[in-house]
Image (tube, coloured by chain):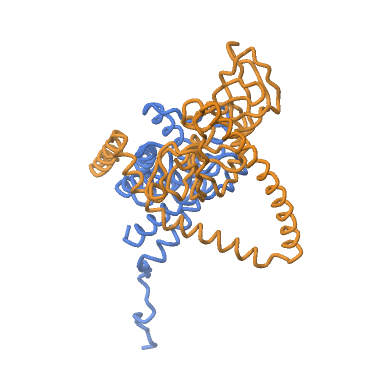
Chain colours: A orange, B blue
Amino acid sequence: MLKKPYYLAFGLFFLISLVLLNLPGKASSQLKLVISDIFIPIFGLSTATHQALDQASSGVMPRRVLLAELEKLQKENQQLKLELMQGADVLRENAQLRTTVAWKQRSGWNVKLARILAREPANWWKALQINLGSNDNITTNTVVLTSDGLVGRVDQVGTTSARVLLLGDPNCRVSALIEETREAGVIAPSSQTIPDQTLVEMTYISRHSQLKPGQKVITSGLGGLFPKGIPIGRIMEVQLADHGLFHEARVKLSANLKDLEEVWVLLP
Amino acid sequence: MNWWMIFCLGVTTYTVVFFEASYHGFRNLTGAQVDLLPGLVVYVALAHGSRPVAIFSLVAGLLYDSVSVNPLGISVIPLLLIGMGVCQKRELILKDQRYAQVVLGMAASAIAPLLCWVLLLFAGRQPLVGWSSLWQWLVVTLVGGILTPVWFKVFGRLQVALNHPSMVESSAFRSDRQIQRGKH
């Protein structure tokens, strides 16, 4: 049997939730940040525990494994030094040529390492939280990447944390380019049947383009949000869209979004 | 419902939301993140009534939305509707039966994402929904249902530990008050 307190509790709290839903965007996001700050201590504790466990596990690693790792890193270091020398020469040449034709000099990237605090709990968004915020000069739409490729963009910024929308989220669409053919398209969420975080779709590619699996997809730089040339992934398969107006390609992302622990944030 | 139980329920809600936001093992394995809040609201509705359900739905929904891309307050409504629906029939539900707990948990875990999805569409958002969502929905429903009896067990034990022990009713017979009849 329904009683008065039942109706009162239901009505009052339903009203509160409706008011919250209809708050202006800025007030809502501010309130959201205030509430999410409650989780900062426990996220900090979790990160510290992870780090302590990592240190403990590296402390008991056998000397043989460490020596093998050291040897591998030394070789990699030598190779990178050579590539750096070569790159520096190319950069110098590029700068001279830009001066000759009076082009604007390209500025280098200013990046900062961020740790992943949390991931999106709902199954219909793709997002994560990082431990950098407005205190670290992070702003909305800041680009987030790893050494493998593009990860996404910052959507909401708090003082000590920020939310990043990942590639494949409906609110994170990226203008992309196929490196070989220079065909442009847009990276959108994948409509595939098996839930896989490593796949996205590249749509609106010209139907006359010659696409092959394995071709590299990079950011086009159009729109001004994402700098040109950041790797996104490689084409897996191509098909003509239902109405035959353009091509759609399934793209395997370069960055492994499933197991991210740290990301680089491209500071303005 | 005493203050200790309210505190325990609050800590559990906080921990559940933290777990859902930071633990990805199950998501990596099955492709779906589980939601334990609908099962918890079923427990609150059956064990504590309408006012605790309303408060729990508000707190849990806000905490969940604060770590999600969801608009703030959207998760409150499904939890509130489920909790109040269960409250309405709580006299008729065999809440101590595990079968009933699992069925209710499954129903709640199935309804909550659907309601949330509908509300998101009404709010003009475009959630990521495709054929794969059907699999995710199935996983969320099954796991939510299976885990619901756990809440009843855990909070049942907590209630026993935190409440005063109930007085054991003795029978009318007391051996020390019986008149012993002698021979005379």
A158 to B120, vertically: above or below: below
A11 to B52, vertically: above or below: above
B13 to A23, vertically: above or below: below
Confirm whether residue A49 shows in the render.
yes
Confirm whether residue B148 shows in the render.
no
Residue B92 in the image, given as x and y percentages of width and height:
39, 43
Left or right side of A251 for A29 = left
Residue A55 in the image, given as x and y percentages of width and height:
60, 64
Residue shown at the point (50%, 25%) measured from the top left:
A222
Left or right side of A3 for A42 = right
Residue shown at the point (40%, 61%) measured from the top left:
B159
Residue A180 in the image, given as x and y percentages of width and height:
67, 24
Residue shown at the point (72%, 58%) measured from the top left:
A69
**Along the line of sight, which residue is nearer the eye, A140 or A1?**
A140
Name of the residue lying farthest toward the front: A100
In the rendered image, the quadrant that contains the C terminus of chain A is top left
**Along the line of sight, which residue is nearer the eye, A184 or A78?**
A78
Q: Quadrant of residue A59?
A: bottom right
Q: How many marks?
A: 0
Q: Quadrant of residue A145?
A: top right
Residue A153 in the image, given as x and y percentages of width and height:
48, 37
In the rendered image, the quadrant that contains the N terminus of chain A is top left
Left or right side of A132 for A71 = right
